[in-house]
Amino acid sequence: MNEKKVFRIGQIVPSSNTTMETEIPAILRAREAVADARFTFHSSRMRMKHVTKEELERMDGDSERCALELSDARVDVLGYACLVAIMSMGAGYHRVSESRLLRRTEENGAAAPVVTSAGALVDGLKTLGARKVSILAPYMKPLTKLVIDYLENEGIEVVDSISLEIPDNLEVGRQDERAPIEITRKLNISGVDAVVASACVQMPSLASVQPIEDRIGLPVVSSSVATAFGMLKRLGLDTGVPGFGSLLSGRY
């Protein structure tokens, strides 16, 4: 394992997303404090302002252009940073998206593994052995229902959910990253295996993950934590990053 290499992290982000370009670097900078690998960060943007199914579908059509642009920079891994855009396209769509975007990088002579935040959350929960979860999301309830259906199609039962019902994506990004600490107190966590502190890569929650986990004694993840875990796995790097919950404990 070559821990001394500098890895280029590519992210495809909605144009109104202000969170993934802060939370993913924060996690990987924290990793730099305990390991030798170093990271640089590069983004390409898809137009999206309001979190509606129609706008998400239009935005997803722009993802191939973004993958092509990022492959020009010869990134080492590519993250698709919009969970609900993938989940709104139908059951299992993260596999279709990851395959399609990988193919675009291959055609450009710069193959890069692709991690969608939707697929990363599914894979992260399965890595934890979580069959039952409760989730917090900023979406309007119909979109949260799409997330629930998507997870349940993957064999993960959603016992309870809270929808903050914020349609403006910029407003989602302005939420207090410590707010989920208190909001998740309202979730029913009886019988669950894990809690999702933010089922959205735009809703800040990084500072809440470890405090919630410490309080409830169960694994707690967020979309950004799961995405960082997926990126580290694709890069063949150790996944231990202290302070961000069980998934990044280094045990997996």
Image (spheres, grey):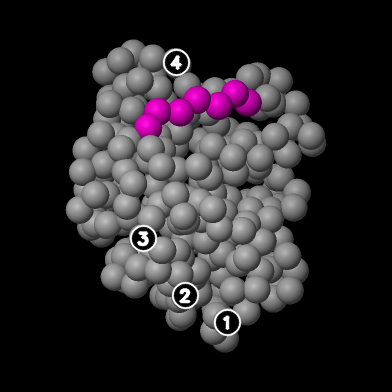
Q: Is residue 95 above or below residue 110?
A: below
Q: Amino acid at mark 2?
A: Ile
Of labels 2 and 1, earlier in sequence is: 2
Q: Secondary structure at mark 2?
A: strand
Badge 1: residue crowd in 10 Å (few <14, some 14–19, many ≥20):
few
Q: Amino acid at mark 3?
A: Pro
- In the picture, the disc for residue 186 is 1
Q: Amino acid at mark 4?
A: Ala
- In the picture, the disc for residue 73 is 4
Give the image location of residue 197, x and y in percent.
56, 64
> Could you give the CA–CA distance between mark 4 and mark 3, rounded to whole angstroms?
33 Å
Give the image location of residue 126, x and y in percent.
49, 61
Q: Secondary structure at mark 4?
A: loop
What segment carries the magenta color? 39-45
Of labels 1 and 3, earlier in sequence is: 3
Residue 64's image quarter?
A: top left
> Could you give the CA–CA distance between mark 3 and mark 2, rounded to whole angstroms?
15 Å
Closer mark to the observer between disc 1 and disc 3: 3
Q: Residue at x 74, y 52 (%)?
A: 243
> Relative to the observer, which residue lies in front, 226 or 51?
51
Closer mark to the observer between disc 2 and disc 4: 2
Residue 48's image quarter?
A: top left
Of labels 3 and 2, earlier in sequence is: 2
Q: Which residue does the numbered mark 2 point to in the structure image?
A: 162
Q: Horizontal placement of 48 versus 115: left or right?
A: left
Is residue 134 visible from the viewing direction of this image? yes
Q: Are marks 2 and 1 in contact (CB under 8 Å)?
A: yes
Q: Which residue does the numbered mark 3 point to in the structure image?
A: 167
> Relative to the observer, which residue lies in front, 211 or 221?
211
Q: Horizontal placement of 43 versus 24: left or right?
A: left
Give the image location of residue 92, x and y in percent.
28, 55
Of labels 2 and 4, earlier in sequence is: 4
